[in-house]
Amino acid sequence: MYHKLRQIALLVSVISLVLEAMFSTVALARVPDSEADIKLSFAPIVRDAAPAVVNVYVRHKAVKKQFRSPLLRDPFFRHFFGNKLNRQRRNRMKNSLGSGVILRPNGIVVTNYHVIKGGENGEIKVALQDKREFVAHIILKDEETDLAVLKIENKQGEKFPFLRFEDSDQLQVGDLVLAIGNPFGVGQTVTSGIVSALARTRVGAADFQSFIQTDAAINPGNSGGALVDMHGRLIGINTAIYSKSGGSNGIGFAIPSNMVKLVVNSALKGKKVTRPWFGAKLQRVTPDIARSLGLDRPSGALVTRIYEASPAQFAGLRSGDIVLDVGGHSVDDPRSFHFRFATMELGGRTKLTVFRKGKKINKDIALIEAPFTPAPNKKVLRGNHPFSGAHVANLSPGLAEDIDLDDIEGVVITDVVRRSFASSVGFRKNDIIVSLNNNPILSVRELRTSVRKNFRVWRIEIKRGKRILRFVLPGGN
């Protein structure tokens, strides 16, 4: 009898717990039943954050190229028509509009590089929420991150409203966010949404990619505006959208605040943006590669080449290693690795988690600047040869980082003079000169010595991206 009573009591307690859980769940999903519930709003956050979000207006000259008629090569036409067959260059003013965020009370503003591109030769104005306008100048631009830092010119020493940074690594998918900017030039606008995804690396809006994805509406003109959290702190700079129509489809991307902070701090120190050098080539881990190396799923970045005297070599990394983690942050592919590594502070060290021969091991790597060794020895080549008009330099880890090349050895074409011999051949900026008449070209000095020779035929190999291009051109007699 006693055992039956215990069983009944236990059953009653279980039923009561189930009913309590059911009623508590129902209580969470309810219709607002008070005036306070109905008045819940993002307004306090917007009131504090919006004054620090500005409109950025850029006005600069866009020069049309001069058209030169081929008929002028004939003396007959040149005699009768002179320069009438030439279309003169016309300067027209080009306007662009975007958004920006004030990050210091003295008027330091961050925006997207693509918003102010061309503004070096024109005028940049910043308009505040209260309709005041100020002229601004560029103090740093970083095309690789698509960020630029401006300084408002204010002689009165006035203090401006500004936003504080939040650690973007603390974001989680599902967090509420607000996007503030000036879409389509209609005026300051606020939209709300959630963090839809993190560490998006296949957006194509910048070289260092690990974007925050949000469904808060972002439209043209929002570029450079603020993505803020529920504390009104900056967690990202709105940069790009995925759209086939040009309008918002609920897929917007923002540069994380930790990368923005790195660029802004560099600007405040009066330096260019300098990132740590890893010193190895990486490749995406495919499912086949993961299976062949004993990894349970495709993740991380596969090391395919180690450069000599690099931090990767000194850390003991090897070809075939898979880097899974940088400084406590997991990486899914080479792009997310480069983003994580680029946000590390120079001068220190960080930990890497590496998968090697079925085991996870830790490696300690130095965070140093890429060296400019050998010296660039920049030259403009002149003379009667195919490279006439080409600007060339010795490649080094530092120069390769600056111009975003994987190769760190050899001679690179850094620019090509218009209408020059090199231009007519088809050489382009960032082409790497591999060989000349089957002789490897390893330095600018070797190249200059070689082009002085009077070859009957010029056989040239150029590396462009991942392709090798071969040119065969007639030489002198």
Image (cartoon, rainbow, N blue to C red):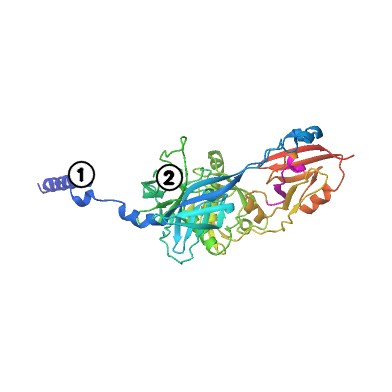
Tag 1–tag 2 contact (CB < 8 Å) = no
**Residue 331: assigned label:** none
Q: Position of residue 31 (x, y in %)?
A: 20, 44
The residue at the far right in this view is 477
Q: Does residue 359 show up?
A: no
**Residue in front for this viewpoint, 275 or 191:** 191
Q: Mark 2: few, some, or many residues within 10 Å (few <14, many ≥20)?
A: many
80, above or below 48, in the image: above
Residue 141 % position (x, y): 56, 55
The magenta stretch is 408-423
Name the image quarter holding residue 342. Answer: bottom right
Q: Which residue is mark 2?
A: 183
Residue 107 to residue 438: above or below: below
Foreground disc of the pair 1, 2: 2
Q: Is residue 26 magenta?
A: no
Q: Which quadrant of the view contains residue 470?
A: top right
Q: Secondary structure at mark 2?
A: helix
Residue 462 at x, y = what percent?
73, 42
Residue corresponding to mark 1: 31
